[in-house]
């Protein structure tokens, strides 16, 4: 018996597939699948040679995201970090689901069997099964808004020098990205291309 895929997993995966579909594959081609490290539970969702990308997806009406790892917004030495913020509206009449994003990525990868196999293996690793399409748990969304933000000096986060007091083993905090400068998709694609050594 397959465990049900919970809502937070679906929301997070949906956001990662949106970024794979609209940013990484257009910038890098099918090889972009190899940069998708979310299914391996790495610190950041996409890892390139000189750039990491963290995807945060929320059902809130504001670009507010919970940060659950102290090092999640740390910029790796010698690299840059982008945060992609995606806001979804959950609605019974939504045109988008995890399945529609999955199918769109599969279409993008169809000509590359190795990339397609790697992608499907990663989806299985995070709990995807085709049964989810008909099992009643599949959430429906409309994309409300999105933004791409360089994580730099002005970005809201705990300083990398922050050390929690002895005995504090976990920490969660919420960041608000409203009024923060973002970059457009074309610039983001260029950043991915220049930070990926082919």
Image (tube, rainbow, N blue to C red):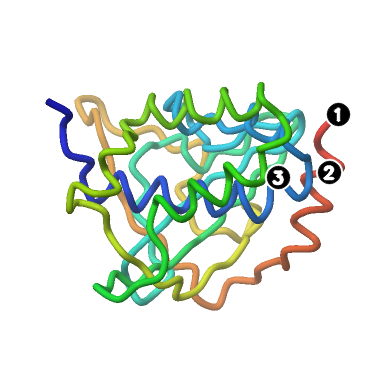
The span from disc 2 to disc 3 (Cα, nearest Å) is 10 Å
| Nearer-the-camera pick, 32 or 48 | 32
Marks 1 and 3: which is nearer the front? 3
User: Does residue 57 lie above or below 130 as drawn?
Assistant: below
Res 35 label: none
Residue 106 higher or lower than 141, as above or below: above
- Residues marked 2 and 3 touching at CB (< 8 Å): no
Tell me which numbered mark, 1 or 3, is placed earlier along the sequence.
3
Relative to 173, is 24 on the left or the right? right
Q: Which mark is residue 197?
A: 1
Task: Give the secondary structure at mark 2.
Answer: helix
The Cα atoms of the two marked residues, 1 and 3, are separated by 15 Å
Q: Which residue lies at the image location 26% right of the left edge and 39% below the top edge?
A: 131
**Cβ–Cβ under 8 Å for marks 2 and 1:** no
* Vertical order, 81 against 145 (above or below): above
Point 59% across, 36% down: residue: 46
Distance from the alpha carbon under mark 2 to that under mark 1: 8 Å
Instruction: Find residue 171 and report its image quarter.
Output: top left
Report the residue at 71% width, 30% height from top: 112
Quarter of the figure that contains the N terminus: top left
Left or right of 178, for residue 154: right
The x, y position of residue 138, in whole percent, is: 26, 53
Per the image, the residue denoted by label 3 is 25
**Which quadrant of the rendered structure holds the C terminus?**
top right
User: Reading the chain from its start, which is encountered first: label 2 or label 3?
Assistant: 3
**Label 3 neighbour load within 10 Å: few <14, some 14-19, many 20+:** some
- Total marks placed: 3
Q: Mark 2 sits on what residue?
A: 193
Residue 61 locus on image (x, y percent): 35, 76
| Mark 1 surroundings within 10 Å by alpha-carbon count, few (fewer than 14), some (14 through 19), many (20 or more) | few
Q: Position of residue 28 (x, y in %)?
A: 78, 40
> In the image, residue 83 lies at what x, y percent?
57, 52
């Amino acid at each position: 018996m397959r465990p049900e895929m919970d809502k937070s997993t679906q929301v997070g995966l949906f956001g990662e597939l949106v970024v794979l579909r609209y940013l990484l594959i257009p910038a890098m081609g099918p090889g972009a699948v190899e940069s998708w490290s979310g299914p391996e539970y790495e610190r950041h969702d996409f890892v390139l040679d000189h750039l990491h990308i963290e995807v945060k997806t929320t059902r809130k009406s504001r670009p507010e995201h919970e940060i659950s790892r102290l090092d999640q917004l740390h910029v790796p030495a010698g690299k840059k970090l982008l945060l992609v913020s995606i806001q979804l509206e959950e609605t019974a009449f939504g045109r988008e689901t995890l399945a529609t994003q999955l199918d769109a990525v599969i279409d993008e990868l169809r000509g590359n069997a190795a990339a397609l196999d790697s992608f499907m293996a990663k989806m299985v690793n995070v709990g995807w099964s085709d049964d989810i399409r008909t099992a009643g748990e599949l959430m429906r969304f409309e994309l409300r808004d999105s933004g791409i933000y360089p994580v730099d000096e002005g970005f809201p986060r705990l300083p990398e020098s922050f050390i929690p007091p002895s005995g504090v083993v976990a920490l969660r905090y919420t960041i608000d990205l409203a009024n923060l400068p973002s970059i457009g998709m074309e610039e983001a694609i260029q950043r991915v291309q220049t930070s990926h050594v082919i």
